[in-house]
Amino acid sequence: MPKTPLKLVCVLGVLACTVANAAQVSEEEELAMAYGDKATVSIATGVRQDLRRAPAVATVITAEDIKATGATGLDEVMETVPGVHVSHTADRYFSTYMFRGIASMTTNPQVLMLQNGVPVNTLYRGDKGEVWGNLPLENLARIEIIRGPGSALYGADALAGVINIITKTAADTPGTEFGLSAGSFNTQSAWVQHGGKLGEVDVAAYLRVGGTDGYNGTIDYDAATRLNQRFGTHTSLAPGSLKTGHDAIDASLDLGYDKWRLRAGYKLRDNLGLGAGVSYALDPVGKEKSERINADVSWSDPQFARNWGLGFNGSYLAYSEEANNYNINPPGIKIGGNTFPNGMIGSPGRWEKQLRVSGYATYSGFAGHSLRFGVGHDDLNLYRVRTMKNFYLDPNTGAPTPDLAFNGGAVVDYSSRQPHLLPHRRLNDYWYVQDEWNFARDWTLTAGIRRDKFSDFGATTNPRLALVWDATVDLTAKLLYGQAFRAPAFNDQYGVNPTGDGNPNLKPERIRTVEAAFAWQARKDTQVNLSLFQYLQSDTIRAVANAVGTSVQTFQNTGKQDGHGAEFELVWDANRSLRLTGNYSWQVSTDQTTNTDAGYAPHHHVYARADWRFTGNWMLSPQLNWVADRKRAFGDTRPDVPDYTSVDLTLRTERGKGQWSFAASIRNLFDATILEPTLFAAPVAGRPDIPTSLIPYDLPMPSRSFYLQATYSL
Amino acid sequence: MSPANVIKQQMASLWCAATWRVFASGWIVIMAGWRSVAMLWRPALCCAIGLTLIAAAAALQPGRGIAVIYPDIGEPYRSVFARIIEGIEEQTRSRVPSFAIGANPNMQEIASELRRQDIRVVIALGRNGLKFTSGLERDIGVVAGGVLSIPEADARNISVHSLAPDPGLLFTRLQTFMPAAKRVFVVYDPNQNTWLIRLAREAARARGLELVAHEASDLKTALLIYQDIFAKANPQNDALWLIQDSTTVDETSVLPLVLRETWGRNLVFFSSSVTHVRRGALFSLYPDNVEIGRHLANSALGYLSSGGQGPRGMVSLKAVRLAVNVRTAGHLGINLAGRQNFDLIFPEQ
């Protein structure tokens, strides 16, 4: 294990010192008797909860936690979750959430993203969408994260983890709040949210407009540099700056009446920069836009009849992604004997819609049993694809070829001649059943199974078992087993791309996981959680070369990876003014094909935060993030990815209605050099001087940055 | 209420309603034009929203003859008082002037402000809020809330809405979870909770329960009594109730003992303190802050309408929500399946 960095020791020392300074007040003592400790008050002022003890290793991040982190978006919050590290890809600087060492590094389809329980993963890539552009936090009531398999309840893509974003209802956001924020990289936003009643209807509404120029760190060597080095040309734009900005609009409406709830949401990302370029060659020109419109209506009655509960949900999601002139490679680039005088330019676009209906019933009429049944139908339709480009793929070799003879190198519509993806519609019918059986005092066995039948790649059945033992008043132990899958994304099946051609015969990617978890209330003010896990991932979908020596690749079920590790969490309420939270995660993942480390994900990860309330309304929250021991993938000869320790500081004051509240954050306070690993690229035969990556010096992450926020409540 | 005050009140209500309409209209305009406007003039939109809120804030005018005095306290309790004030304003349908009392409040300044605004009744929240009202002029009525208890002599002249959950509501819940319950044990300090135990005895009698209430004026005595209760309690019919009592319910000695013994003996243990449910108590009732605000507002309005002849004395907390520990319920063999009407559930995962 690497040495613990000095900064970590220093910051923990500072955190510990604050214990002595925190004040206690008699008024607070009396209120604590009525309302409980700080943590209890925060949730006791929230809204009604559903009765469900998750038979899983789960983390709940509250709105209060979110504020304390000083995060500007979901990506930063996810980094605080045990067992999760947020990395970024070179193209678009897209965030990938690595759960327990499972990292695909180009897309992120092993993680199911839900919004209020409804999947929002896109069909094209099977993840949260390549034009992601982060997610603002003001409107989030909480985030529920399950580490480990979740397909027995949630179906496809709940392979490595599940993230459920819960937005605020009228009860969560009473009154009207306005907010303004600004910060480094020309980041600005303004929002308004309101919660109240319209007659008998609970209404919550949210609108946010924002944008950022984004971090503009320098890439010294890119894919074009590599081609230049290989073919003796001089076309690369490196060294050059990253493009990570975007404009954003987010809106939502939540209506509740009796047992009914109607939600609608809108998410627009426009002018999204392409990071280090879609093919890892710097692109100062290209932009992307995505638009998501979603709505769902649900009805639920937990006590519909004696021993019976019922509910249903119907949802609709429309999602589109449109590129505006990707400069895939710069002018003059030479690839495989072809020269592109205008460079390679493309403007792909895709439009999809997802219609889902589901229903459930619960039954508690058998002594000691609590049953839950569910059925559902999904209609997933990627109905339109646009392919605009100035080149085509040679039908025989797959090699990109400039379209000079027919169109003089201009960008033209290839949507019918050679689309980058074939439109596709997938239907899924599923059912599940789960029984929570209290078979002896303090012993509960939860057994669940779900079967999904897809119209294109067939059926899959995924079980879940959880044995829970309430050993003592302070200690709970869980033993869990689960199987899960991720559905082949439409690009995996029907993509037209020489670096990853679609394969309609793909099967789902699978995982089997065994977990042991312990929750121990060590003292009245100290909660300790420990989880241990082991998994075997198989049929992993990867792009594989069609033949030795060729660069044309097709997606295949070929990978196999195993892993094991542990996560340790500690929450210590040192006194009424100070709470310390932290977690340490350790994992080892092995690619069974090569019997080497799977690479990319950190073996060690520490996160620690102190929330210190002082002088009434002020709260100071320093936090530390230590990411260590990231190996390279098999064949990559570069040294290991450098470890890093970042420290953030957030100071905020929260005041009541009719007053301004402020927050100020410094992220990466000590300006640590943070690098996220780039992908391995096969070595060029006979050219050991050419690096084993398209961007060999990894991806720089934001330097020290500052953010200010002001909110006003009515 | 004087005719002038009625007119002022109506004017304020109309003014508030008009302001909200203007406000809502502005928002709709923003919503409608966001796409074109926002993408091009982000900073302009920020300013527009900022100006709107300043205008709206300026437009909201306080009304009525009620004011709130509350302690200037940090989070998370600040939010508690904010919610209570929200409930007061909802019930009075007006913006109520509120004064946060810090460590060294300027009594004279606040008192003159109360006079200037023709305040006739003050809702005092928290220990500090209540303390402040002792210096007020006699013709200003006081309704107190946000405290557990005050000496009974002090409560004779004012109405005090305690944060101690109503024993009757607790016992009703107990009987729902444990229909066979016959006896309830409680240990209390007579200097703090005589009033509550008096209520509890009546509530128990009304529900066919026997309340076995033991007095203890110090922790050592209390611990001995708890040991005795554990020795003779019958888990089939008996339950233990922990109240909010700084003498007899100590977090470092009594609570661990109670948790260990009740778990080991499968004895039902419920509490007036929600934080105990997090640790392992079967259930608790905890304050519904907005509803408390409404109750306080009703008391204050009653005081105004009755010409200062409102009810006096301590009132237990009836604006409550229910917290349950499903792990403890499972351990005790209580089946909660099908009962979903809980406001707070522990453990959280």
Image (tube, grey):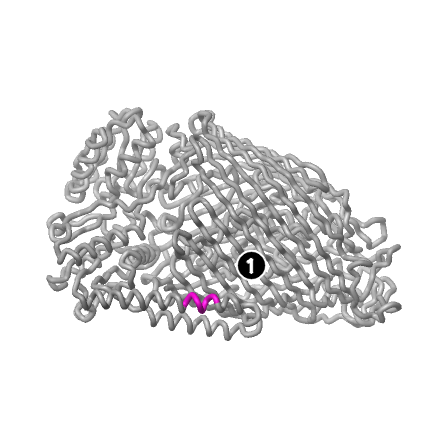
Mark 1, residues whose alpha carbon is within 10 Å: few (<14), some, or many (≥20)? some
Residue A621 x/y as whole percent:
43, 59
Residue A257 x/y as whole percent:
43, 48
Q: Residue at x 54, y 50 (%)?
A: A296
Front position in the image: A78 or B174: B174
Residue A79 x/y as whole percent:
54, 54
Q: Residue at x 64, y 44 (%)?
A: A589
Front position in the image: A66 or A272: A272
Horizontally, residue A396 falls left or right of residue A34, namely right
The amino acid sitting under disc 1 is Tyr
The relative height of residue B316 versus residue B206 in the rendered view (above or below) is below
Front position in the image: A603 or A699: A699
> In this orientation, does residue A149 appear?
no
In which quadrant of the rendered view does residue A595 lie?
Answer: top right
Q: Residue at x 62, y 39 (%)?
A: A484
Circle 1 marks a residue in which chain?
Answer: A
Horizontally, residue A492 falls left or right of residue B1, namely right
Horizontally, residue A535 falls left or right of residue A415, namely left
Question: Is the C terminus of chain A in the top left, top right, bottom left or bottom right quadrant?
Answer: bottom left
The magenta segment:
B23-28
Q: Is residue A562 magenta?
A: no
SS assignment at label 1? strand
Residue B292 x/y as whole percent:
27, 51
Chief secondary structure of the magenta portion: helix
Q: Residue at x 82, y 55 (%)?
A: A551
Front position in the image: B130 or B305: B305
Q: Which residue was labeled with disc 1?
A: A266
Horizontally, residue B192 falls left or right of residue B285, namely left
> In this orientation, does residue A524 appear?
yes
The relative height of residue A107 versus residue B186 in the rendered view (above or below) is below
Q: Is residue B25 magenta?
A: yes
